[in-house]
Image: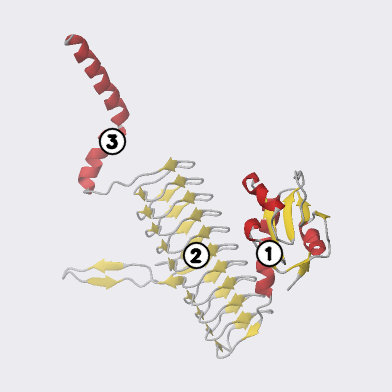
Amino acid sequence: MKFTARQISEILHGSIEGDAEVCVNRLSKIEEGGEGSISFLANPKYTHHIYNTTASVVIVNADFEPTAPIATTLIRVENAYTAFTQLLEFYDNYMKSLKCGIEQPSFQSPKATLGEGLYLGAFSYIGDGAVIGDNVKIYPQVYIGDGVSIGSGTVIYAGAKIYSGCKIGRDCVIHAGVVIGADGFGFAPQMDGTYKKIPQTGGVIIEDCVEVGANTAIDRATMGNTVIGRGTKLDNLIQIAHNVAVGENTVIASQTGVAGSTKIGSSCMIGGQVGFAGHITVGDRVQIAAQSGIISDVKDDAGIMGAPAFDHKEYVKSYVYFRRLPQLSKKIDEINKKLKEINK
């Protein structure tokens, strides 16, 4: 699909310098642009590329002042980076909108409710009582269990599995290989050394505008629901255990694991490979560095890091001294200074 510079300018509310009817059909980096491509210039570090780029259109800031002739058509906007992001979003949504209809072979229960504009890829399955909203895109080999509800505009990529009774909101993105609603890890130790499975009878609620990265697993609750708040973004390869609650607009990087019944607040930023113990509460706007181990409650607005892993009894003893290291170091310096004076 081709767009003219004029059409793009209207989408971005920009102004054109150059050929308004030049056509583009792909996006590119400014240094890799070619005929028919559109790029952007936001970082001054890349300014030199605009004088020799072969991209047909380049989006620039309104205050950009060239110091040499430019062959490409310019679209001036208030913020080039934001505008290009907007264009990427428009392009992505446009490409998704092209997907429509039901491919075969696939299965849709006659007891399921399917919205308008549905795309259902081949080898997908929709169970009894499932409710699928308008303009939902379900790619091949997706499993949607009985009683699942999926809000309008949500995209579920290939191979995702959504177990029975789970609820997914509007405008969510569920990437390939995600498993939502598998049993929580609940087993009761028995006198004979075996483990008896505790039935996991709850569900999962994913609120609106959530994105879940590839191969992430979100377990169903033992009772009640595991909840992922509106606007939260989960990276690839994350484990969310049963009865966990994550607040709104929190971002969690890959390989993080959250143990059962832990509560994480809103607007938190959590690095990769962070481990959370179970049954703890993390406040709002908390920032946690990568590879940290969180074993107790965290207050609002905290910034924390670190995870020494050794015997927990020794750790508790050592932690008392660890927190006092600055004071102990100061005392040692003072003692050393006095010893030097005595030995003069």
- Counting residues from the start of the chain, the first of labels 1 and 3 encountered is 1
Q: CA distance from mark 1 to mark 3?
A: 58 Å
Q: Is residue 97 left or right of residue 296?
A: right
Decide which of 230, 200 is in the foreground and name it.
230
Residue 291 image point, x, y percent: 37, 51
Q: Residue furthest bottom?
A: 105
Q: Are marks 2 and 1 in contact (CB under 8 Å)?
A: no
The reply, left or right, for residue 167 in relation to residue 70 is left
Disc number for residue 34:
1
Q: Secondary structure at mark 1?
A: loop
- Give me the residue at 46% from left, 51% from top: 270
Front disc: 2 or 1: 1
Question: Which residue in the protein does label 2 denote?
Answer: 213
Residue at position x 40%, y 59% in the image: 255
Q: Which three-letter amino acid code belongs to the residue tagged 3?
A: Phe
Relative to 251, residue 104 above or below: below
Q: Percent x, y for residue 39?
A: 68, 58
Q: Quadrant of residue 229?
A: bottom right
- Specify few, some or many for label 2: CA neighbours under 10 Å numbering under 14, 14-19, or 20 or more: many
For discs 2 and 3, the disc positioned in front in the rendered view: 2
Please state which of residues 118 and 150 is positioned toward the viewer in this rendering: 118
When the figure is inspected, residue 38 is found, relative to residue 68, above or below; the finding is: below
Real-space CA distance between mark 2 and mark 3, rounded to the nearest whole angstrom: 37 Å
Name the image quarter holding the C terminus: top left
Disc 3: which residue:
322
Relative image position of residue 328 (x, y in whole percent): 27, 26
